[in-house]
Image (spheres, rainbow, N blue to C red):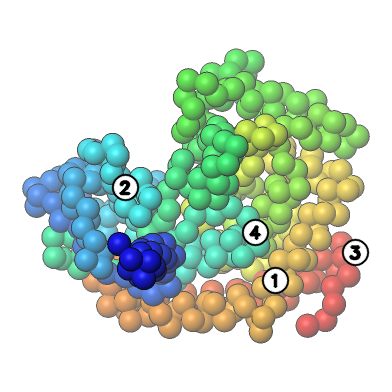
Amino acid sequence: MTNMRRNIIGLLFFCLLAAAQNPQDELLNRTGVEEVRITLDPEDWAKLRANYLENTYYRATFEWRGQRVANIGIRSRGGGTRSAIKPALRIDFNRYVSSQRFQNLRAIAVENLEQDPPMMREYLSMALFRRAGLLAPREAYIHLFVNGQDYGLHLAMENIDKAFLTRTFGSANGADNGDLYEYSWIDHWNWHPRGTDDSAYVQEPFELKTNSSSASVSVWRNLVDSLAKSNSDNFTANLGNQFDIDNFIRYLALEVFLAETDGFCGEVGTNNFYVYRRPSDKKLQFITWDRDTTMSDYERDIWHNIPHNELARKLTDVPEYRAKFLNAIADLVRLAESDNRWLSRLAADTYRMIRPYGTTDPVKRTSNAEFQESAASLQYFIVERLRLLRLMLQREGVRMESF
C-alpha cells in the first residue's frame, strides 16, 4: 500500500470517527423537537395503558432518525404524572439484551409533561443547572408516536446511572466507580434521625443503584447522626468530610432561585435528587432530578421551608455558609441576567420551538388557551423572580449591582 493511499484511508477514518462523535448526532444533545417512534404488540400497549400504575415491562422497538433499536423494554413511570391517556415511559435499551446501548445510554425517561402546564419548567430548570455548572441530566423534546399513533410532545431525559457517571466524572482513576443513590420520597422526612440501624436508610429512602455488594451503606446513618449532633460551631468538623458543602450550597441556592416546591426543601419533605459518593474523597454530591414543579411562585421567600429541613437549616446557621448561600443566589441572578438576559431569551426561544407541537398535542391535559397562558406566566415569573430576589438579597445585606 502506498503512503498516499495510507494517508487517504487514515483521513477517511478520522473523518468518520469525528462524525460519529459529533455531539449533535446524539438525541439528548439536540435542540429541536425530534420525532421518536416506538412499536410494540398492540395488546401489550393496551396492557401498559390499562395498568399504568404498574411497572411491568413490555418488549418494543425504538426508532429515531433512521436508527433502530429492537428488543428494548418499556414501562409506565412516574409518581403523580402516570397516565393511561398520555403515558410517561421508562425505556430500557438493555432490558432484554444486557450489552445493548443507544448512543451509550442504557435507559432514558420519557416525561409526559402532565405536571408542567407550559411544558418548559423541567427543560429550563435543567438548562439552568447545567449552565451553573451543577450536575444535571441532558434532555431533549420529542414528538412521540406509538404504533403510528400521535402521543404528542414529551421530554426525553438522560437516566442517572453508570453511563451518566462516566459521562460527567470520566473513568480515569475509577472516578465513575463510586456509590450512586436515588432518594425515594417519604412523607415529611426532613433529615431527622430515622433509627440506629443502616436499614432505616438503605434501601429506603436511599436506594443504592451501583456497587450493591461493596458500598458503604452506613454513610447515611453516619451523616444523619452527625447532623443531629451538629450546631453552628461544629457543623464543619462533624460534616465537612462527609459531603461536598460548597457544591450543596450552590445546589440549594438554585432550587431557591427556581422557587422549587417539591425539591430538597419541599412542601411535604425532601425530594427529587440522586446522591453520588465520590471515590476520590468519599464525599457525597447531590444530583438534581425531576424539576416540573419549579417556576410558579415568584414571591416565594428565599428562606421558605429551610427552617423545617435539618440539613438546610443547620448549614445556613453557620455564618460562613449563610453568606455563601446568599452570594450563590446573587450569582444565579447575575447568570440569568447575563448575555442579554439569557434565561428570558431561552424561555422565549423554547416556547417558539415547542408551540406548534404543544398546540397540536392530541392528548395533553390542558387546553391550548391554558398552555399559552401558562407559557406567558412562566415568562412573567422570570422577570418578577429576578426583581424580587434582588430585593430579598438587599434585605439580607447582599449588595447587588443595578442591571
> Helix, strand or loop at disc 1?
helix
Of badges 2 and 4, the one in the foreground is 2
Quadrant that contains the N terminus: bottom left
Answer with left or right where residue 194 lies relative to residue 204: right
Q: Mark on residue 397?
A: 3
Residue 262 seen in render: no
Residue at 50% x, 45% y is: 166
Q: Earlier in the sequence, mark 1 or mark 4?
A: 4
> Helix, strand or loop at disc 4?
loop
Residue at 54% x, 61% y is: 126
Q: Amino acid at mark 4?
A: Gly
Quadrant that contains the C terminus: bottom right
Q: Mark on residue 101?
A: 2
Q: Earlier in the sequence, mark 2 or mark 4?
A: 2
Whole-angstrom CA distance, mark 1 to mark 4, is 11 Å
Q: Earlier in the sequence, mark 1 or mark 3?
A: 1
> Helix, strand or loop at disc 2?
loop
Of residues 127 and 103, the one drawn nearer to the viewer in this rendering: 103
According to the picture, the residue beneath numbered tag 4 turns out to be 133
Answer with left or right where residue 145 lies relative to residue 331: left
Q: Amino acid at mark 2?
A: Arg
> Helix, strand or loop at disc 3?
loop
